Image: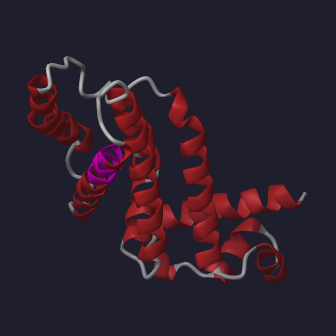
């Protein structure tokens, strides 16, 4: 019963977030739409930021669990951005809210996870020290974070996955060729 109530609260919150900016949503509005009382909401969540944090933590956990099942960088990036693409307005509203720090942590964790999977796949047999491997992971995570942030700031008006494809063609492929390696940079 408690899990069903939490699920209803989350779904209602996401629906409201698709309709209006984060700062306009109230606990009163959520409980009214769910048909529950305020005490039920506060039994599960201390406040709205706690609700946002749980939603984001669940999404990060889901993505990290699935990370090993992706066969390519493109598939990983597509999945990492799936929440943004499915809940475009909700993501944009949280991104532009006072809880941006929660959102930024979510985005960076996903970018790091994508980068780890990518680097461990594409550079699995490369003669790199662990320190160099970590530097490449961090660099790719920061590039991913910056690209997604730019995409969000544009109102998600272009295909960010195409930007990643182009970026890998310009940066990764030449570096791989220079080392005598041939690999699909999005694999």
**In the picture, which quadrant includes the C terminus?**
top left
For the point 61% across and 50% down, the residue is 61
| 134 lies above or below 54 | above
Q: Is residue 140 magenta?
A: yes
Question: Total marks drawn?
Answer: 0
Between 35 and 91, the residue placed more toward the observer is 91
**Is the image coloured rainbow, by chain, by secondary structure, or in one colour?**
secondary structure
Q: Position of residue 14 (x, y in %)?
A: 56, 61
Q: Quadrant of residue 128?
A: top left
Give the main secondary structure, helix, strand or loop, of the magenta stretch. helix
Question: In this image, 50 relative to 113: left or right?
Answer: right
Q: Is residue 91 above or below residue 134?
A: below
The image quarter containing residue 118 is top left
Rendered location of residue 28, percent (x, y): 68, 82
Task: In this rendered view, identify the residue nearer to me: 18 or 145.
Answer: 145
Which stretch did the figure color magenta? 132-141
Compared to residue 86, the image places residue 155 above or below, namely below
Q: Residue at x 41, y 58 (%)?
A: 107
Quadrant containing the N terminus in the rendered view:
bottom right
Question: Foreground: 122 or 51?
Answer: 122
Horizontal side of residue 175 vs 148, given as left or right: left
- The x and y percentages for residue 32 are 72, 75
Q: Is residue 122 above or below residue 59?
A: above
Is residue 40 found inside the magenta-colored segment of the image?
A: no
């Amino acid at each position: 019963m408690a899990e069903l109530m939490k699920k209803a609260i989350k779904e209602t919150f996401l629906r409201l977030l698709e309709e209006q900016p984060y700062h306009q949503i109230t606990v009163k509005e959520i409980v009214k739409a769910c048909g529950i009382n305020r005490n039920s909401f506060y039994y599960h969540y201390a406040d709205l930021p706690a609700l946002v944090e749980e939603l984001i933590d669940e999404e990060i956990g889901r993505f990290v669990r699935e990370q090993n099942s992706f066969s390519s960088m493109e598939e990983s990036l597509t999945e990492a951005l799936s929440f943004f693409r499915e809940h475009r307005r909700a993501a944009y509203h949280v991104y532009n809210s006072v809880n941006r720090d929660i959102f930024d942590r979510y985005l960076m964790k996903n970018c790091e996870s994508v980068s780890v999977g990518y680097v461990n796949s594409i550079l699995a047999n490369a003669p790199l020290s662990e320190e160099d491997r970590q530097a490449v992971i961090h660099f790719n995570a920061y590039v991913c974070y910056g690209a997604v942030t730019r995409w969000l700031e544009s109102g998600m008006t272009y295909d960010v996955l195409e930007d990643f494809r182009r970026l890998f063609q310009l940066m990764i492929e030449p570096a791989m060729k220079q080392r005598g390696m041939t690999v699909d940079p999005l694999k």
